[in-house]
Amino acid sequence: MATIFQKIIDKEIPATIVFEDELCLAFKDINPQAPTHILLIPKKEIPTLDDLSQQDQNLMGHLLLQVPNIAKQVGLSKGYRTVINCKEYGGQEVYHLHIHILGGRLMKWPPG
Ligand code: 5GP
């Protein structure tokens, strides 16, 4: 069954998209945990970090390289936090790989 993020990729449900290219999509999180909370996802359906294969090397490099561009675009000049939750103990809820980009406030460490 398609995840909610696949439906966003397919434009079946709306999202506030801040960046899109042929390989990835970035949009605002519906339940933001910081003043700015963006989700960056590959368009390829990859459920979790554990499902990556060698074939995904260029794709994941591409995704990571978009992070500073997107952060700049949304005004996170003071810095930001990136998070990838993986499976149950990582707190992952949506099983389509995504990078959280959080900013606009001072982040604490360690995370909860
Ligand atoms: P996870 O816990 O899987 O790392 O993060 C999933 C994120 O997706 C959560 O921060 C949640 O708020 C966000 N989310 C869940 N459903 C939707 C949705 O329909 N639209 C958007 N924009 N974000 C969603």
Image (cartoon, grey):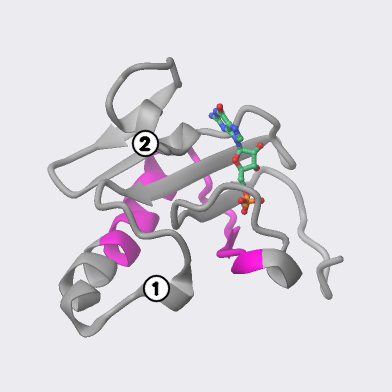
**For mark 1, does the 10 Å Cα neighbourhood hold few (<14), some (14 to 19), or many (20 or more) residues?**
few
- Between residue 33 and residue 69, name the one nearer to us: 33
Q: In the image, 18: left or right of 21?
A: right
Dot 1 lies on which element? helix
Residue position for label 1 = 51
Does residue 13 lie above or below 99 as drawn? above
In front of the other: 11 or 63:
11
Q: In x, y percent, where is residue 8?
A: 38, 27
State yes or no: residue 68 in magenta. Answer: yes
The magenta span reads: 63-87
The x, y position of residue 20, in whole percent, is: 24, 36
Q: Residue at x 70, y 69 (%)?
A: 90
Image quadrant holding the C terminus, namely bottom right
Q: From where the camera sits, is residue 27 visible?
A: no
Quadrant position of ligand 1? top right
Q: Quadrant of residue 92?
A: bottom right
Q: Amino acid at mark 2?
A: Gln
The furthest residue to the left: 22
Which residue is at the front of the view, 45 or 65? 45
Q: Amino acid at mark 1?
A: Asp
Q: Position of residue 70 (x, y in %)?
A: 37, 46
Which residue is the site of mark 2? 6
Residue 58: quadrant of the picture: bottom left
